Image (cartoon, coloured by chain):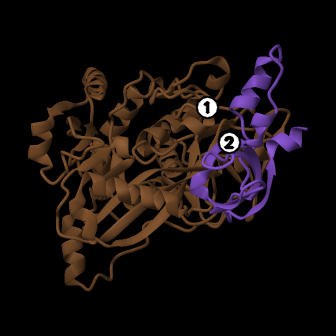
Amino acid sequence: MRLTCPLCGDRDRREFTYYGAEDYLHRPAAEAPLADWDGYLHLRDNPAGETRDLWYHEAGCAQWLLVSRNTVTHAISKVELVAERKA
Amino acid sequence: MRYSGLKVFTEGLFGNKGWRPAWRDPAPKAEYDAVIIGGGGHGLSTAYYLAKNHGLTNIAVLEKGYLGGGNVGRNTTIVRANYFLPGNSEFYSHSLKLWEGLEADLNYNVMHSQRGLINLFHSDGQRDAFARRGNAMINQGDDAVLLDRDGVREMLPYLDFDQTRFPIYGGLLHPRGGTARHDAVAWGYARGADRRGVDLIQNCEVTGIDIQNGRVTGVQTTRGAIRAGKVGMVVAGRSGQVAAMAGMRLPVESHILQAFVTEGLKPVIDHVISFGMGHFYISQSDKGGLVFGGDLDFYTSYAQRGNLPMVEHVMEAGMTLMPMIGRARVLRSWGGIMDMTPDGSPIIDKTPVEGLFVDCGWNYGGFKAVPASGWCMAHLMATGESHAVARRFTLNRFLTGHLLDEEGTGSQHNLH
């Protein structure tokens, strides 16, 4: 598996650290109900097919990446910078 | 047909013409008292114990592929009860006891081999932690022996004891640990359930779960609708998709775990050896192949195959631990889809939908749990109450904080 980092280009999977589902980008407010925190931390759609998840380019630009990926084929369709997406 | 040594002998004399299929191939009925989604190890053992322990025989197992075609046929066959935490400890202890009587109970040779399992440690701190774990195992009624370096050397002289990164300080021996023939476990339970009247329905994919007024009423399948007042979801890595049919999200991520086997060799590794610091474990199958594996690839996947970086890592760890295997040729590798929970422990519980039950979250340790998982899931489906040894495997423990974090690494999806 290789990922194309928007800053560094096409790189080996070993350079990246997987973090988890896109859910981690939607952090509840501190006073949100417990169920919201449970959803954010634990509950997952866990799709077989297209998914979006967070990877960290640890051995490269140290940017957080939002990767669109197929969990059945391991094909990667899009890699975005989390920093730019939020801006 | 009852299997026996005499039967094998007489069949051999008469050309083996008397063998019959081990189970029927029935068409699905329109209604059952209960259906189990998933014909793997856990689903089949659930069906078996529903029939045997609770007298429920008007039940069906629905399998989208063939029986035992998922993780029960894709694992590394290790059976052990070396858990520490209350909640896990009594459950795996119960499972090991069931393993020890399984062949007689099923009248099926599952080739359960209690060859001993050794967990290596590599520092004073790790030795103390293992001593504590061994005491917990003994308190639970199971067996554990703390070996020092010489003790390990006597049993496993071929390890590299002086490797610079992780020198071997000793090991925790679990003499009753070992292996079993993975497919035979699925087949034995399938045959046992079938003989008690359970319908095992293959090539039957569940496409929907019918719910009325908060109560499950049946399932839609590729072979028609089936009504049932009780439905058990026992689908391991596919738990997310099946639960979604009931409108639920589970605390489960599906990850890929790879395993490897070499060509058949003469007996060389007599035990199961676990080298946790290197993420490597190994045993030798009765056929002679060295069966070994490592850690997850660490990204969600349903591909049933992994990537090369983890292959390389596992091979390096193996060579670090026992350089003697370097010239064995790897015959094949494969991946299983692991239903990972945030704390690394399983779930056997009711769901918010009445009559709908879930058994999932077996992480990378589902094989040894097959007997007790079925035992406890059957108890739950038959009585509506959790079994005493599975009481802490609750679905909502992440919300309430009643975690079972055996590794002590935390309760978050990327930590186990």
The chain identifier of the residue carrying mark 2 reads A
Going by the numbered disc 1, the residue's amino acid type is: Gln
Q: Secondary structure at mark 2?
A: strand
Tell me the quarter of the picture where residue A11 sits.
bottom right
Q: Which residue is mark 2?
A: A20
Q: CA distance from mark 2 to mark 1?
A: 9 Å
Q: Colour of chain A?
A: purple
Q: Which residue is mark 1?
A: B412
Q: Secondary structure at mark 1?
A: loop
Q: Colour of chain B?
A: brown
The chain identifier of the residue carrying mark 1 reads B
On screen, residue B6 above or below B253: below
Tell me the quarter of the picture where residue B134 sits.
top left
Contact (Cβ within 8 Å) of mark 2 with mark 1: yes
On screen, residue B367 above or below B323: above
Residue found at x 21% / y 44%:
B116
